[in-house]
Image: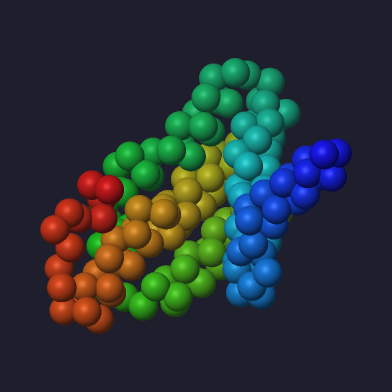
Amino acid sequence: MEDAAPRTSERRLRRNLGALRHRNYRLYFIGQVISTVGTWMQSVAMPWLALLLTHDAFHVGLVVATQFTPMLVAGQFGGLLADRFDRRKIMFVADLLRCGFIVSIAFVGTVWWLYAANFLASASAMITSRRSKRRTRARSRSLRTGVRPLVSAECR
């Protein structure tokens, strides 16, 4: 009777982590974890840097506002770019631009450049957002199969 509980939990663990047996999924999973950790570090570091530079809560709020404004104002254009051009090239260029904007903060070091770099980095990250990727996948699937989905990818 005592052996039944560990076997059941071991089977459950194997079933839940079974996808990690595949090399491609492991690479994808590890890449997503690293990317998510980096994004969260950036989300914390930018307002913190604004606080260290200005000692004013207003500037912290302004940094957070510049981080989310591109998605609110021009989110649909990221999907348009993802639909029109090669997704891999767009993601590579957008990530390269984002990296350049973030690294440039260390060399310029003014609060106004922090706002600009944060805005531009968020704008380049917007292009590779999950929504535009989902739209691209739905479009490529419909082109490959010749069948248009009844419900668009945005409504799911």
Is residue 38 at all visible to an observer of this figure?
Answer: no
Q: Would residue 71 be found to the left or right of residue 112 on screen? A: left
Image coordinates for residue 114, horizontal then vertical, percent: 58, 42
- Colour treatment of the image: rainbow
Note whether 49 is above or below 22 in the view shown.
above
Residue displayed at 17% across by 63% down: 149
Picture quarter with the N terminus: top right
| View extreme (right): residue | 2
Residue 19 picture quarter: bottom right
Image coordinates for residue 121, horizontal then vertical, percent: 51, 52
Total tally of numbered discs in the picture: 0
Residue displayed at 29% across by 61% down: 135
Residue 71 picture quarter: top left
Q: Would residue 14 be found to the left or right of residue 123 on screen? A: right
Closer to the camera, 116 or 129? 129
Note whether 91 is above or below 114 in the view shown.
below
Image coordinates for residue 155, horizontal then vertical, percent: 23, 47
| View extreme (front): residue | 1
Q: Would residue 3 be found to the left or right of residue 90 on screen? A: right
Closer to the camera, 55 or 94? 94
Closer to the camera, 11 or 67? 11
Residue displayed at 85% across by 39% down: 2
Image coordinates for residue 17, horizontal then vertical, percent: 66, 57
Is residue 68 at all visible to an observer of this figure?
Answer: yes
Residue displayed at 78% across by 44% down: 4
Note whether 29 is above or below 53 in the view shown.
below
Note whether 67 is above or below 7 in the view shown.
above
Residue 68 picture quarter: top left
